[in-house]
Structure formats: C-alpha cells, structure tokens
Image (spheres, rainbow, N blue to C red):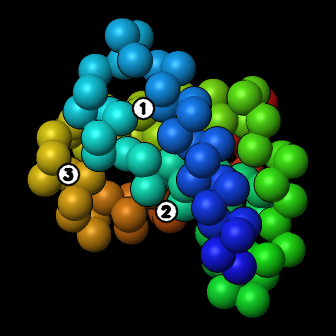
Amino acid sequence: MYGVIVQLLEAVEQHFRGLRGLVDQVYRNNLKFHTLMVLSWAIQGATTLPALAIPNLDVKKATPEQLKAVTDWLFNEFNQAGPEDRTAKDSAFTDRLKKNWQAASTKP
C-alpha cells in the first residue's frame, strides 16, 4: 500500500515541479495531497477508496495527461471555493470535492 502511495505522490510532485512559474505557489503548496486524493479517485473510478484497494491502484494510469485533467479540475474547484490556505485545510473543501467529483470530471 505504501509503495503505491509513494509512487503516486512522486508523480504528483513531478507534475507540480513542471508547473513552477506557470501556477501560483498557493496551488502547489496547498493542493499536493488533494491532488493525490483526486488522482486516486480517478484511477479507482470512485471516491470511496478502502485501504485494501490502494495496493491494486494501477500507478501506470498516473500519466501526465491524467495529472493535468486532475489538476485542472481541482484548481477550478479551489478557485471557486476561495484559493486560500484556510480553504485547502478545511474539511469542508474535501467534502466539496467528494460532492462535485465525477469520473468524467478528471478524464484526460
């Protein structure tokens, strides 16, 4: 399970490094773990991700195109919720993501 999470997190961090200079730091600082969460949903196809399902996530699906689709959707949600540190740290933002996410939202 941890190996899969580390691989997905590395893909997210690499994607964010590519956004330096293109995207304000508030997004990169505040949305790394939200991106990991939504990327996992996109790979799984559902917002429910039991711990036992994590080892079965196909990390090969964390393509640059998939990461772009996830971050585009997530950044839009963050903008609508108010792009501030406190928004990203509020559990209401995670609830908003769960409520608004659909598999089609983050398809490349």
Of mark 3 and mark 1, the one earlier in the sequence is: 1
Label 1 amino acid?
Answer: Asn
Against 53, is 68 above or below? above
Tag count: 3
Dot in front, 2 or 1: 1
At 35% from the left edge and 35% from the top edge, which residue is drawn?
A: 28
Quadrant of res 8: bottom right
Q: Position of residue 52 (x, y in %)?
A: 75, 89
Instruction: State the residue in front, 79 or 68.
Output: 68
Quarter of the figure that contains the N terminus: bottom right
- Determine which residue is flagged by label 2: 99
10 Å neighbourhood of mark 1: few (<14), some, or many (≥20)? few
In this picture, residue 93 sits left or right of residue 7: left
- Determine which residue is flagged by label 1: 76
- Determine which residue is flagged by label 3: 87
The Cα–Cα distance between marks 3 and 2, rounded to whole angstroms, is 16 Å
Against 72, is 22 above or below? above
Secondary structure beneath dot 2 equals: helix
Of mark 2 and mark 1, the one earlier in the sequence is: 1
The Cα–Cα distance between marks 2 and 1, rounded to whole angstroms, is 14 Å
